[in-house]
Every structure is written in structure tokens, then in C-alpha cells.
Amino acid sequence: MKNGTKYLGIAIFVMLVTLLIFPSISPALAEPQKELPINKYGWLDQIVFFREPDRAKALDELKKGDMNAYFIDISDPDLYREIRESPELSYDFSYGLYYDLTFNPYGPKFKNGKLNPFSDPKIREAMNYVIDRDYIVDEILGGLGVPKFTCFVKAMPEGQRYADVINRIEDAYAYDFEKGKAIITAEMEKLGATLKGGKWYYKGEPVVLNFLIRVEDARKQIGDYIANQLEKLGFTVNRMYKTSRESAPYWILGDPSEGTWNLYTGGWITTAVVRDESDNFLFFYTPEGLPWSPLWQAYKPSPEFYNITKRLAERNFKSIEERNKLMEEAFWLAMKDSARIWIVDQTAVWARRKSLYLVADKAAGYANQAWAYFINRNMKMGGTAKIGSAEVIIDPWNPIAGSDWIYDSMIYDYGSEDNAFVLSPQNGLPIPINVKTVTMEVEKGAPTTSNSETKDWFNLTFVDKVTVPPDAWYAWDVKNQKMITAGEAGVKEAKVKFVVNYGPQLNKTAYHDGSKRTLADFILPWIITFERANPSSEIYDEDSVPSFETYRNQFVAWRIVSKDPLVVEYYVNYIALDAEVIAYNFALWPSEPWHMIATGILAEKSKELAFGQTKAQKLDVEWMNYIAGPSLKILSKDLDQAYNEGYIPFKNFLGKYVTTAEAKRRYKLLKSFYEKHGHFWVADGPYYVDRVDAIAHTALLKSIRLLPYKLEKPARFISEFMIYPYVTVAFGYDKAIYWKYFPAKEIKYGPEGVSLVLGGPAVNIHTKVAFEKVGIKLTGSTLTLPNRRTYRSQWGKVGYGIATIIGDNLYVAGSTRFGTEAALLYILKNRANKGLVVVKWQDKNGDSKVSLDEISVVFEKL
Amino acid sequence: MAFPKVAKVMIKRAFILFLMVLVATYITVIVANAGGYIDKIEISSIKLKISQTVNGNPAYKGLSLEERQKLIDKLSQIEIRSRGLDQPFLIRSFRYLWKAITLDLGRATVLTSDSGSRSVRIIILERLPQTILLFTTATVINFFIGLFGGLYLSRKFGSFWDKLVIYLSPTSAIPGWFYGIFLILIFYTWLHVLPPGGLVDYPPPTDSIAFFLSVLKHMILPLASWVIASFFIGIYSNRSFFLTYSTEDYVEVAKAKGLSPRQIERRYILRPALPPIITSFAFAVVFSWSGAIITETVFNWPGLGLTYYRAIGVFDVPVIVGITVVFAYLIAATVFLLELIYGIVDPRIRAGQGGGL
């Protein structure tokens, strides 16, 4: 659920739109995609989240600088105008909310004998012509919307993929009231209705349309406009203004044959960029969309349309080309069917102060999965951000089955947890955060492909057969507390194999309490997945069974191939349109350490707390909360117990990966963390949760750089040092060079943790020691690499500089001060993605100063 | 001999009050669930939400339609069961009633407390301190302003200040939250000297004194809005009340006897006026514990009023019933205690002396 898209019925989406008319403002949909300043260690020093549900007040606070960004969308045209006119503010857009006009297709006559014009697909289709969507966008939404004709958001991947088809549909169904009227008139006459005095009659009585109009948002005005158009066509309209809850018994629960309603102003929302939405047609136009709803059961798509929707939903196609063909056919057939017609994609505004950099996801806006990696102030390290949101801290946070509210997950998940990948807010493709490479093998004929954007780290090949090695872990045996291998289970084949190289992870990267990641952190969550779904387990939770069964059908096995670097093979029976998404969905990543989860296991075993809310309800105990409330006392008690016993969960197996001494050390670290921060939320992301105040609904996140101990993050690439030097070491003139680019940065005399060491061996003893160790020689005029390659400098005219990683540190040095500065400037500006770079500086303009255009790369090596 | 009669009367009164609480609670149970009709809406909401969640989750895109539907059905059933919606409403209604009357407030079906607990007791208790802090403080301030202001004006009948209060008393028709919006506009939007809402600064100060001062700072505007809203009408109504008492015959007699105004005020005006004053104060304090929905919304103040409002919005029957029954008991207890206090403070009221209560 965390990474998935959530469509929610607009029933739970409450937005009050103040309707004031002002000239059309059409935000651009297709913005050029820029490289995101992803910093996996975070840019800021601290981030404060606080609750501000009032959008107008939030805007005031933004202007005054009491808030730096608002993590809730704004759809009020007046507020949008204020944001645009404010010199302090900047804004972005998202497009996740859209409105439709849902028809009751039953008929032609209801049980009460009344005529239902919308039983006729041609009338439904003709409704496309009689609604002026541009009018709705400009005059009702104040420009905050885009006309919509299909069930895909134009700004999203599917909308862009089929932009050509959508454009043709827009042309074909453009507003033409007279054309629509002519079709409707002809069809109404065929149905036996007569037009007298401009009003439609059926069997002597006016044709009345019961129109359910939602009142919570812009749909009230949209509904009124459509009602006016229907009256112009000669219908008598009964406007039934209702809220979400009031309207549900009619449209989604009621029997359509009873004729209590004819039309409904529907609305839908999506909260993440999804790249494959080919099942939309099946959902919106066929009985299989919502099998429990009487309305959906009244849908009668043509056999041809139904067959296509089903094939698309089940991915019953052999190639992307075949999918494209099916999709195009479905687009046109959906217009012919028009069980519902689409009105607008609403454009939501996300506001922030100009001094704070953020990128809005096309669906989720600022509250997207990757926000913590790129939020920054002028691309510099440090600073504070105060972020307002409609809600902050709602449901319990726990690592197994905690809150799935976006208001919670945008903090505890997206803010404090690291990931193997995150989805790009721009195109929905995975971005590797803790993954170096993925190589994937897929059975020939599977409809999947890779994207050019991922070619640096992702490699896809098609093979005849994917064989599962017999020693791969297939399942966890709850009864015997051991792993079942694929060989033991008799599993030999899978549809997909992918190999993830995580780089150096084990015993090098740290969690927020200072514990270092081990294999046990990867293994425990997988064991728990099986335990929670097995009735014989002490932590069984029936709520997890359906999801587990689904997972089990898709995930086949995994195998740890190498520990340093950590390389893991995965075998799955799952195909996605974008092959990268397969890896994103199934690659394991332990965001929380095993000992933090183990404390919760003890609490659940003793039936004092439960990870899942359903089980908590059933046991009449608290839903486990690692940050506040009565859970803390229980978890604290269980932590003491775990420490005293040296508790290792599932010790028969996990004991191979954890010693009692290590377990005790970890529990001690967790205890210290709890005593200092007042909660147990320990993760591994760029920011740790320093404090939460659940009553005041505020959370303070701080950069991991501010932790009292050093997190030995391995920097394999120079680019990582650009964003993560805890300490800079330099002497003499090299200090001046560094301060030229980082004016406020403190410089130390020796490395502390991960350091950037600046200056050649002649002046910097740390460089001297490191260079001697690896065989780099640097004199006042020459630079010699271990491979004996030599570069000669000429004072003031030509200089060579080197940037290289040795151990945990990055060393930047030159044969002259010009070479040193050239190397520093180059890696700063280019974020060189290499382990060793040699640059040449040539004073082209004779000013004896180093500038970027005078620098060239002469050698580089991973 | 009077005690057994008093005890009998009080037991009878307690029983009647308990019956009233019982009836009020059951009516709340029925109304909160619209006689069971809400169940249908809730079930459809659950199914729709789970359908959309499953259909929209990329991890489930690879499932066949049958598998996907099976998953939706299972998840829906689990959620329906956990909310108790699989049982007939009539049975649940009596269970709610029993739990409520025995003050076993149980667990919320949808809401969680600020700290994430589903316990209705914790949901209420976590919000109560802030509610008391703001609204009871405002009630007490308003009470004493009204009391002393009214007493003062009753002595200065017809003076400039008396007339001013009379003329301005209609301004109290404007609710406190409305003044609150103006206060925010002046002190935050314009002057930027006081916070526009919230309980405390962000991030909250770590030092407890600084934290307390920060809370006080955040209280200024909402407190002021309530005080302003009640200021004139409070003084005016008390002034009229005391004027009525100050024209009684026994007050005239006391004046004729030459007692000082202070003595007259204390012995002949305040003393007989005490029962209604105590009644009004007691109920004002009890009602202040229920918070104020709009003021809490305007000032983003985490009070009990908003919790009640949200519980109604999501049909969380245990929370609605829990808050209602707590207040029903509080009111009943207040009424009961007042009966006793009347007897102490007003010599005219005595069980067994005349017609009884």
C-alpha cells in the first residue's frame, strides 16, 4: 500500500472551492524534465512538520515565512491568484483529481415506467458534444483544470503515451451543442418521446432527469451548468444536491432499475504516478469494475469492447505494439459506450517559498515518495524547512502494519526511511537510491520493456527459460523455523529473474540509532511476512493473509549471491509494462533494523500490542505505535526484556546471522535512542525523527549528519561526496580554495568519519599517507597514477588535479594549487560519477584563475 | 429525622437522573447510526475504498480478474468484521448502551487518539486537558467578569458605563470564533505578533517552562475571542439579575435599618442569588469541557469539540456515544450535587420542611 497508487472515491475527498471567475490561466502540462538534485543523505539540517488544515491561513503563513512549503494541494482559484502574485512564493501543479458524469444506463424504461434517455449509448455519447469543457475550466475552475475526454489523465504516463489518440478524440468530440442536440433529438424520438413546446414528453408526462449533484466542491457548479444544458435540450431536470454520503445510497448502492437517479457528478483521485493503467477501461465501463455495485452490474459494454477491456486488464497481449493497438481501439469504443463521460482533470496547486526547492509529483504533489532526497535551499547543505500539512500524525507508526495515511507516510516513510529505489515524481520510473545495477532476464514473449532513462543501471534481456537455482530461498517454514529452498519445494522455473547489486551495504551503512546493517535486517522482514500469514504463528494476523497470498503467487524465491558488495538474485512470476517496475516492486530493502522490529514482536507475542489494527481491535489491545501513546511503555518494557535475554527472534535460523552479544549491543543502542528522543522510530533515511508531539501534531526531523556518532556511509562515487562530506580537511592555501566554494563550511585538521581531504601530499599529511598507500605520486610538477601514467604541470599555465576515493574518504589534490582547485571545481559542477578523475587546467585567457571552461577530463576510472 | 427523608429523596432523584442518562444514551446510539441505515453506507465506502486501493496498486496489476476480486472480497470482509458491521445493528445498539452506561467506553471504529490509540477513554482524555485549559479558563474569566461587572453596574444603575454596556450588549450575538478571525487578521496577518493558531510553537520548545509559555502565547487569541464575545452580555445579564434582587422588600428593609451598602450586597443580594449563580457557573464549567467546534477549527486547537465533530462525520458510534455518556453523567452528577448545595447555601430550601423538593 505504501508504494502503490490509491484511488479513493471522491467520497473521502473534501475540498471547498470558492468560485470566483477570473481570466483563464492554463498551467502548462508538459514541463521539460530536469535532473533532480537527488541527495540520498538529504540537504537540510532539520524539517518541522506541523498541522495547518486551513488553506487560506497556510497561504498567510507561507507569505510571512512561518511556513516554507504546504504539503496539501490548493484548488481555490482565488488562493492560486494570490500565490502567483506573491513575490515570495513559488508553486507547482499536480493532476490527480478528475471529474466525470456518471450515467444510469438502465432501461430504456425504469421499473416505474419512466423513460431513461441514458439507456441509449448514442445519447450518452452525444452528451460529449453538449458540454463545453472549456467553459467549465475557465469560468468555474478559474483556469485550474484541463478538459477531459478519456479515463486517463493527460499529464500522466498513459495520457502522454496515447496523446495522439486523445487529441484525435478531443477533435472528434469537441463542443458542438447543435450536433449533440440533433443526435439526442433523433434518438429520443426513436425511444418514443415527443418534443412539445421545447420540452420532452413521454407518454404524456415530461421526461424528468433526476440529477445527483455533489455539493462539497466545484461539482456543484459543474452540475448546475450541465443541468442548464440539459434543460436547453428540452429535459426537465430535478437537481438533487447531495453530499458524498447522501448520494452513495443512490448511485453506487441503489438499484438502478428503480429510476431514483439518471445522472451523477462523479469524481476520482489518484495519488501517485502510475505507468500502467490499462485496466481503467475495465474498471470504468464493465460490470467487473465493481462487482458488488448494482450500477456496475447494469453496464452493458459491447462484446467487442468488453473483450478488449478484459485483455488489457489481464495483460493478455504479446507485445507492446499489440497493447497499443488494443488501447487505441478501447479509447474509441469507450467513447461509443460512454457509460460515463469525462469532464475535467482538475489542476491542483502546491505552494512553497521560493527559497525552498521542491518538485511536485504529477499526482501526489510535494508529498511524493522522493521529496526528502531533494528538498533543499539553493542547492546548499544545511538550513531548516517548516512544512505545513492538513494533518500531521494520525494513526500509529510501526514497521509492519502501521498507518497508511499519506499524512503519516510522507513523514515516517518518505522522510525517515531510505529505499532501494524511489519512484520519480516526474515520470513514475524507479530511481535507484541504494542500488548500483539491476540485470533482468525475462521469458521471451512477455509484454515488458525497459526505458532509455534507466540504461545506466538497468539491463533487460529476454531468455527462453528462467531457471530457479535449487538453493534459492522459496519460503519460510513457520512450523520448523527454517527456510525452504526452491529445490525442496520442487520449484524450478520463474517468469523473471533479476539480480540487484546493492553495492557495499553490510556492516557499513547505519541506522539512526547507530547500529550497522547486516543480513539479519534483510532476512527478518521476509520471515515475518510468512509468520503473520500462518495461523500457527504467535504473530498471526488474518488481515495479512489476502495480501500474503497475492505476494506468494507472484514472488518465487531469492538468493544472496554476494555479501560485499551485496548482490541478491530474485525470481518472480510477475510482469509489468516497465521492466524496472518489477525490480522496484520486489527488491527487498530493510528500512528498519531487525532489533527495532523484534521489540514489537515481543509485544505482539505477549498480546499486549498488535502490529495490525484489525488484530488490535480483535484482541482489544493497542495498535502498536512506536512514537506515542500507551504503546511506548509496553515497548520499553519489552526492550528491557529483549536486552536482558539477548533475544533473537526466530533464533533457530536468525541465530546464524546474529550473535547474542550483537543483539544486546543493538538493544542498548535502541534504548539510548529512546531515552534521548522519546520514541522508538529508528530507520535509515536521510532524516531521523528527533521528536514528535502527537497532541500538538508536530514532528521534528533532523539530518543524519547531526547525529552524535558517525554514520559510515560508503561513498563509492565522487558525486556522493559532493553531498555528503561530514568533515573537510585542508591546510594553508587549500583552505582558501575550499572557502571560495563553501564560504561557511568549517574545516578540520583531520578526517572524522567520511571526509573530504583537500590538498596535495606536500601540505596535507592525510593525503600523503593515503596516496602512498595506493601508489599515487604527486610532486610540484608531476602527477603519477598507480598505472604509471604521468601528467606534467607548468606553473600558472597548465595544472593537473586528481579527485579519488581512498577508503572512506575523498581526496582532491593537484600538482599545483590550480590543479587542486580545478579538480574541486570540476567535481562540484559535474558531480562526476566516478571513483577517480584526473582533470587538466589550462589558463586559456591568461588571467591565472581557474574557470570551468578551462578544465577538461584527461582520465577517469570507476 | 430529616436525614432518612433527604436520603430517600436523593436516591429517588439519582434514579430518575440515571434513567434520563440511559434514555439519552440510547437515543444517541440510534441517532448516531441512523437506526442502522449508516451501516449500508459504511459497507459501500469500505468496499469502494478497498476496490480502488487494490485496483490502483501496481503490485496487484499482474493478478487475474478473479484473483483481484477475491482479494477485494477478503479484505472487505476483514474490514467489515473489524468494524462490527457484520452484526445486526439492534444487537450492537444494546451492546453500545451497556458498555456506555457501565463506562466501559471501548474502542473507536475509525478515529484514533492524538497518540494513535483506539481507546475511546484515551481519545477523550488526550483532548480534555487542552479543552479545559482554553475553554474552562475562558468560562471562568467570563463568569467573574460578568459577576463583578454586573454587581458593579447594578450599583451604578443608569450611569454612563451602565448605558454603554446596555448599548454594546448586542455585540455578543456575534460568536467568539467570528471575533477570532478578526483577531487573527489583526494580530497575525497585520501585526505578526501572535500566532494564528495551534497549541505550541513549531518545533515545540524542549524546556518545560518555555513550552508552557509558548502554549500561553497560543492561547491569547482564542481566549480573547471568547472573552470579547461574552463580555457585554455577561455583565448585562448579571447586572439585570442583581437589579431584580436589589429591589426586593427585604433589601429595602435593610436599607431602612441603615446597613452599609457592602453589607446589604453581601447578605441580602448575593446570598439569596447564590443558587442560580452556582447553577449557572457549574453548568458553564461542565459545558466548557465539551469544547467548541468552530473556535477549535479557526484556531487549530486540539480540543474535544473537533473530536466530537469528526466522530459524527465518520459515524464512529463508540466515540459519539462515549463522549455523550460522559457528559450525560457529568450533567446528572452536577444536577445531583446542586440539589445538595442548594440546601446548604439557601436556608429556604430544606427537605422535610414543608413541601419537600
Image (tube, coloured by chain):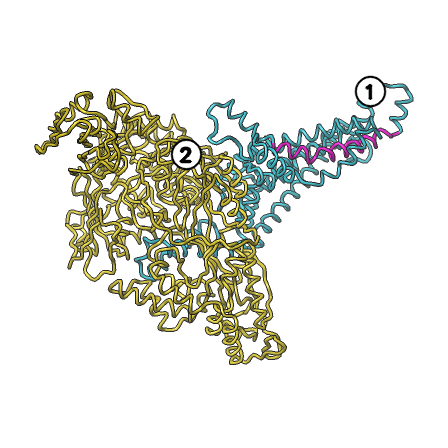
Chain colours: A yellow, B cyan
Give the distance between the C-alpha atoms of the residues marked 2 and 1, in whole angstroms.
63 Å
**How far from the left and from the top, in percent, is residue A74?**
49, 47
Dominant secondary structure (helix, strand or loop) of the stretch shown in magenta: helix
The chain containing the residue under callout 1 comes to B
Residue B101 quadrant: top right
> Would residue B88 be seen by someone viewing this image from the given angle?
no
Q: Please tell me whether residue B225 belongs to the stretch shown in magenta.
A: yes
Q: Nearer the viewer, mark 2 or mark 1?
A: 2
Q: Position of residue A442 (x, y in %)?
A: 20, 56
Q: Quadrant of residue A611?
A: top left
Q: Chain of mark 2?
A: A
Q: Residues within 10 Å of mark 1 (few under 14, many from 20)?
A: few
- Residue numbers of the magenta segment: B221-248
**Quick one: SS at disc 1?**
helix
In the image, residue A156 above or below residue B131? below
Which residue is at 64% across, 45% downward? B24
**Amino acid residing under circle 2:** Ile
Question: Residue drawn at (49%, 76%), measured in percent from left and top?
Answer: A183
Q: Residue furthest left?
A: A788
Q: Which mark is residue B263?
A: 1
Picture disc at residue A47: 2
Asked if the stretch drawn in magenta spans residue A817, the answer is: no
The one of A838 and B234 positioned closer to us in this rendering: A838
State the image quarter where residue A156 is shown.
Answer: bottom left
Q: Residues within 10 Å of mark 2 (few under 14, many from 20)?
A: many
**How many labels were placed on the picture?**
2
Q: What percent of the width, then of the height, locates residue B205? A: 48, 26
As drawn, is A395 to the left or to the right of A736? Answer: right
Q: Amino acid at mark 1?
A: Gln
For the point 30% across and 41% down, the residue is A419
Q: Quadrant of the C terminus of chain A?
A: top left
